[in-house]
Image (tube, coloured by chain):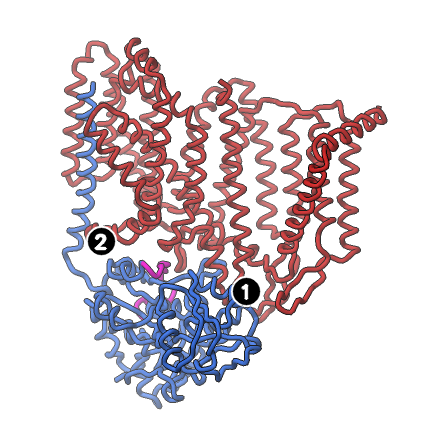
Chain colours: A blue, B red
Amino acid sequence: MNKKAIVSLLVLALVAVACATDTAEEAAVEEVVAKTTLDTVKERGFLKCGVSGTAVAFSETQADGSVTGIDADYCYAIAAAVFGDYSKVEFTALTAAERFTALSSGEVDVLIRNTTWTQSRDTELGLDFGPTTYFDGQQLMGRNSDGLSASSTLKDIDGLKVCTNAGTTTEKNITEGARLVGASIVLETVETFAEAMEKFKAGACDIVTTDGSALVGNRASEGALNDWSIFPSTPISKEPLGPVYRSNDSQWGDIVNWVVYATFIADEYGVGRSNVDSFDYDANPEMGRLTGKNDGQLQTVMGLSADAFYNVIKQVGNYDEIYSKNLNPVGLYREGSANASWTDGGLIYSPPAR
Amino acid sequence: MIEANTKVDYGVVKRWLKENLFSSYSSVVLTFASIFALVALFRGIISFIISPERQWTAITYNLQLYMVQAYPESDFIRVWITVGLVIVMFGLTWGYNSKNIRITINNAMDKLIKVFVVLFLLILITPTSVTTDKVQGIQEEVLQFNTRLLFLGYVTILLVTVIFIKFKFSDKTVLRDLLSFAYLGFLIASIWFIKVPTVVFDSTNVRVQDQYLPVASSTTIPWTVLYFVLIGFYYLGKSFNSKQVIALKRAIPAFWFLLPLLVVTWIYRKPDFSLVSIYSIDLPMVAVGLVLGYISLFIFNQEKNKKYQKYFFYLTLALFLVSLFLPILRQLKIIFFLYFILTSLSPYISNTKENSKNLLIVWTLSISIILFLMRGGTSETLIEVPGSSIYGGFALTWIIAYFGVLLSSPLGVLLALGRTSKLPIVRIICTTFIELVRSVPFITWLFFGSVMLSLFLPRGVEFDEVVRAIAVTAIFSSAYLAENVRGGLQSINKGQFEAADAVGLNTIQRISLIVLPQALRAVIPTLVSQVISLFKDTSLVAIVGLFDLLFVGIKVIPAQSQGANFLGTVLENIVFCAILYWVFTYSFSRRSMKIEKRLGLGER
């Protein structure tokens, strides 16, 4: 009896192994023919885009399950360029811990998840960063009743109690920044930023510090626009956020880059969703080339259709429209920030389309 | 009559108060201290709920996100049909198993009186105003004197009515099921009348002041219809019971077991059941499977053929192994595999005529169901979800919990048997597995399944995130379950094994007929607490990017700045999630208490 049991167990194990290798081999054979990301995406019929799903104004999940935000809009824009239909996107919600693995293992085609572009991430992970779509930076938030205002500097926080979340660079930035200007601060680190906010609201902290966009969002949600100030106007750290893609496929990288650039250029010339059809393209040959009104050869050599970027602007909009729609409601405006166009003294700048 | 009753009651109340609350000076002090503490606690909870700062619309507006995330509204009819099917089966089960228990009106009304008295007290202690700004100490009036009086009046009227019924019909009895229908009917009727806080947009899509609006007819009408469907099928089930329809007794558990599989196939996969593929692939496959099964069962039933069984077993094994390497349909491979299982098991199970008849039915059903599920599971889904993931919210919580339990239970039992086995290899494998799984935190395993697994698998081999989460949950839970079951196994007297051997049972029969029924019965409480903890542990899948109920509540909704704007509404959502979890885990434990009672556990 026992012998039989052993034999049948062994056979079952064999079967399991056989089944597993069977499917694995099939898939491996399929993978031998190396395909470009663009081909994979086109064949699949939709774009797989890695987002956060819970980042205010960057990628939020709405009540009907749809995803909105500036990051989500750039996913829609890439789909509009590749398929001519912005809705051909499948969002994958990724946590900060798994985002890079998900991208390099091919689970997503592009990662637009408010990810800061740093040297180590760019060079060590086998990933490349696209043009920055939002220039963020660490700032501080304090109460007006403590004599702080939007024009305060790091010197003004001398002797105050600062709260931030542990395990990130924010802690390091504020310590180094304060030491640099000779301000002595009491630093308290908590587990998450939400906790730091609770302490700040309860009066247990005088200052909270994290990325400027998060501070603005929190201030808006608490309705404390006139009670709390965010400073210094020049952030104490650089956090450029933009799309990330695998570094082994330059065609795909070009497509992602130029979708972003197309929104910049359209913004520069004031071409948006409303006037993209009525715009006088003869008077502006660069816009003509970009939207494929001439021969559209610039787009077809990239593997896209001639009117790819026309679809982006028509269906999603230019940079200013994307920015205003998503970030103005939480109190983030372009004027005077690094996110203004280069013609207005900002950093939003694109190579020419020719 | 009534007079006499009231008099006696007063005496009872007085005596109860004196004995339980005011028996000595210290107990008087304790009583008042706890009343004070309770009032303070409930005042705090109530003022939290009714504070004008609370945005309860965050929940009513996001109910769909909470339940099914991005499931498209155009396919909601599938959900309603499934819910209808559940209600139909629930009614049948309820009616079929109904014991016609009668309870006295007196008892039923006593319970209602308790509810209304608590309600009365709660309205009484509700604070008039709540602090909305702690720093500046701003207070806002939330309950006017007249409104409070009005509410108290309503409750008093209800209370008086109930007390009147209690004394008027105190000697009458009523069917317990009818009473349940009455309560349910009251709930259903109330959704036609209550008004819920609703988010309102003006013509330019800007959110304006929330309003109290009636529940939408797309909610009220289906539930009302379902209520009457429930009553109808309850009586149908009752009539089946009185007509002694035995088939239903077997069909009901089988249906409840299969239901979630059908739900996932029918709601989430929306498989492409094109007639061509069904005629050309599925039906021939079923025919092949059935014919094979019937032939072998027919042969084994003949006494003179028993000696060929062994060769037949090797033949089917060879057939299956060869089929693995042949370029044939996957369905056929599966059929050969099942066939091999059948031939290896049938000598042990089909030794009587009755058993082999049952085996025939099981074979027919399993072939059809597995092929149906394969069609559902492998064909392209027709559901279009714009963007977001189709799995999410409370549905995801249930899917992971259900499949986690479904897969981990047999695995856990097998591991427990393996660990107590006499075979050294099996024992070592099982022990190592259990100890390895138990010694690493659940979150680590989830990360392993989500992030690291893809590094080990060849490129292109992808499992869905949900599938990976289910697999990890099942494996993790099975290790704990195995230890629980092993506890049960150890409680079984050695004499039971010897007795089983003495009557000539083989190993499978000994385990399935003698050992497991006793062992599992002994560990029901721990098994249920394992199920409850698995149900709650599903909230950890959020760390691998799945939006389960809790994650939707504490992260997704508080991050909504577009549309209705619920930025920062964490507290409301946590409370809602906690209530949902509580309702379901509490009903699990109530259910398990009933099972324990039925099995007479703890009584002997």
Residue A44 appears anywhere in the view: no
Looking at the rendering, which quadrant does residue A277 occupy? Answer: bottom left
Residue neighbourhood size for the residue with mark 1, other residues' Cα within 10 Å, grouped as few (<14), some (14–19), many (≥20): many
Image point (42%, 53%), residue name:
B547
As shown in the figure, which amino acid type bears the numbered disc 1? Ala
SS for dot 2: helix
* Marking on residue B506: none
A148 horizontally vs A337: left or right: right
Name the N-terminal-most of marks 1 and 2.
2
With respect to residue B301, does B290 lie above or below? below
Residue B20 lies, in percent from the top left, at: 70, 32
Q: Is residue A119 magenta?
A: no
With respect to residue B404, does A218 lie above or below? below
* Marking on residue B564: 1
With respect to residue B233, does A313 lie above or below? below
Image point (51%, 50%), residue name:
B577
What segment is highlighted magenta in the picture?
A81-97
Location of mark 2 (residue)? B455
Residue neighbourhood size for the residue with mark 2, other residues' Cα within 10 Å, grouped as few (<14), some (14–19), many (≥20): few
Viewer-proximal residue among B269 and A219: A219
Viewer-proximal residue among B578 and B493: B493
Residue A324 lies, in percent from the top left, at: 46, 76
What chain does badge 2 belong to? Answer: B
SS for dot 1: loop
What chain does badge 1 belong to? Answer: B
Label 1 – label 2 distance at C-alpha: 41 Å
As shown in the figure, which amino acid type bears the numbered disc 2? Leu
Residue B567 appears anywhere in the view: yes
Residue A257 lies, in percent from the top left, at: 28, 74
Looking at the rendering, which quadrant does residue B357 occupy? Answer: top left
